Image: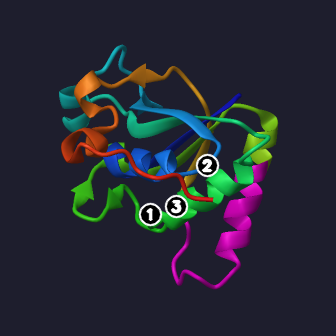
């Protein structure tokens, strides 16, 4: 199993999207990229921690590639929007890829460059690509939030 970490706005929707991907064996939501020890949701929302809301994805690379996960990441948010996704504003909602290996860093950089030159966006992509740092797990109430609220599990997509 391998690990990938993405920030693309509110972590509830981001996690729901990745949970649908065949080959993703586990997800959790939490915080990464800040300077504050053991942050909680209210700390992050208060914009005092420097953390991004992130989804940590555990995946089986024999079923789904990191490149395929990057494709999902780019599809589920606007990477040209600085510190904002939809109605959510603040650095905690920034577009960010936290890489765990040099190979992930290279793949992220290449996919971002390819997307930037594709003509899909008129504006520059503002996604940050940073080394993974300490991952702080969010409270249980935030884990698989949409599944808990709807009472159903989502079907995996190919």
- Please rate how many residues cluster around mark 1, counting C-alpha atoms within 10 Å: few if below 14, some from 14 to 19, many from 20: some
**The image quarter in which residue 100 lies:** top right
- The residue tagged with tag 2: helix, strand or loop? loop
> For mark 1, what is the residue?
77
Residue 90 on the magenta segment = no
36 or 108: which is nearer to us?
A: 108
Q: Nearer the viewer, mark 2 or mark 1?
A: 2
The outermost residue toward the top is 37
Please state if 128 lies on the left or on the right of 139 as rendered.
right
Magenta-colored stretch includes residue 125: yes
- Element under label 3? loop
Residue sitting at x 19%, y 35%: 46
Q: Nearer the viewer, residue 145 or 113?
A: 145
Relative to residue 62, is residue 82 drawn left or right? left
Q: Which residues are magenta?
A: 107-126
Mark 2 and mark 1 in contact? Answer it, CB < 8 Å: no
The quarter of the picture where the N terminus appears is: top right
Reply above or below: 9 against 58: below
- Please state the horizontal and vertical placement of residue 27, each as a whole percent of the image: 48, 34
Crowding at label 3, few (<14), some or many (≥20) Cα neighbours within 10 Å? some
Calculate the distance from the C-alpha at mark 3 to the C-alpha at mark 1: 12 Å
């Amino acid at each position: 199993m391998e690990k990938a970490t993405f920030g693309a706005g509110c972590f509830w929707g981001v996690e729901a999207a990745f949970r649908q991907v065949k080959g993703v064996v586990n997800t959790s939501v939490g915080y990464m990229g800040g300077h504050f020890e053991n942050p909680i949701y209210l700390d992050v929302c208060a914009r005092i921690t420097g953390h991004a809301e992130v989804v940590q994805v555990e995946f089986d690379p024999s079923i789904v590639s990191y490149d395929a996960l990057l494709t999902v990441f780019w599809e589920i948010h606007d990477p040209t929007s600085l510190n904002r996704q939809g109605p959510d504003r603040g650095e905690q909602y920034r577009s960010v890829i936290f890489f765990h290996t040099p190979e992930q860093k290279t793949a992220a950089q290449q996919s971002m460059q390819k997307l930037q030159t594709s003509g899909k966006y008129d504006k520059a992509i503002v996604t940050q690509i940073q080394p993974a740092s300490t991952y702080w797990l969010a409270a249980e109430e935030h884990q698989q939030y949409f599944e808990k609220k709807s009472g159903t599990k989502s079907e995996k997509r190919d």
